[in-house]
Amino acid sequence: MTQKVFINLPVTDLPRATAFYNALGFPTNPQFSNEMASSIVLSEHNYIMLLTHPFFAGFTPKPIADAHQVSEVLLALDCESREAVDAMVDKALAAGGATYAEAKDMGFMYSHGFADPDGHIIEVFWMPGPPPG
């Protein structure tokens, strides 16, 4: 069974956040985008929904976390190669993102990551084979 995954992220500046993810090579699905949300297509079954704070607040009774101050969630995206990991981080930095740690080579996996302009952490990784275990 194939299921779709929609990752909802609160953003303070929707046009800026949309442009950031577009600069990484992820297109916007206009069918599910408007002045309150942008649907970012990661793959056929995976999406990031960028939601303005007022729109996001309508889905939860809890306060919205400031991702610059606290960890709310850690997202991880796989890449086709070690070079693709580095290229994604380079694109993120050029588009206004920031790194929060050095790249890690653990033998079975190479990873690096970035924070988007709203502070959401995105890990990007490459595994040359199946995970250990």
Image (cartoon, rainbow, N blue to C red):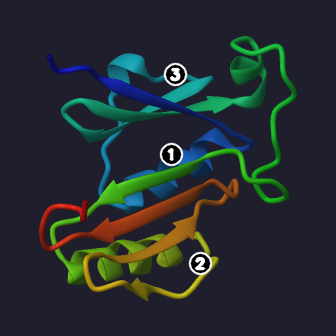
| Outermost residue toward the front in this view | 133
Quadrant of the rendered image containing residue 107? bottom left
Which amino acid lies under the numbered mark 1 shown in the image of this protein? Thr
Q: Quadrant of residue 63?
A: top right
Quadrant of the rendered image containing residue 128: bottom left
Instruction: Give the crowd class for mark 2: few <14, some 14-19, many >=20 residues within 10 Å.
Output: some
Left or right of 35 in this view: 68: right
**In this rendering, does residue 95 appear at all?**
no
Q: CA distance from mark 2 to mark 1?
A: 19 Å
| Above or below, comparing residue 36 to residue 117 in the picture | above
Q: Residue at x 35, y 71 (%)?
A: 88
Q: Which residue is mark 1?
A: 18
Q: Which residue is the site of mark 2?
A: 99
User: Which label belongs to residue 34?
Assistant: 3
User: SS of the residue at dot 1?
Assistant: helix
Whether residue 56 is situated above or below residue 102 in the rendered picture: above
Q: Residue at x 36, y 27 (%)?
A: 5
Mark 3 or mark 2, whichever is nearer to me: 2
Note whether residue 99 is visible.
yes
Total number of numbered labels? 3
Measure the C-alpha gap from mark 1 to mark 3: 11 Å
The x and y percentages for residue 43 are 23, 40
Give x and y (percent) for residue 130. Answer: 15, 61
Give amino acid for label 3: Asn
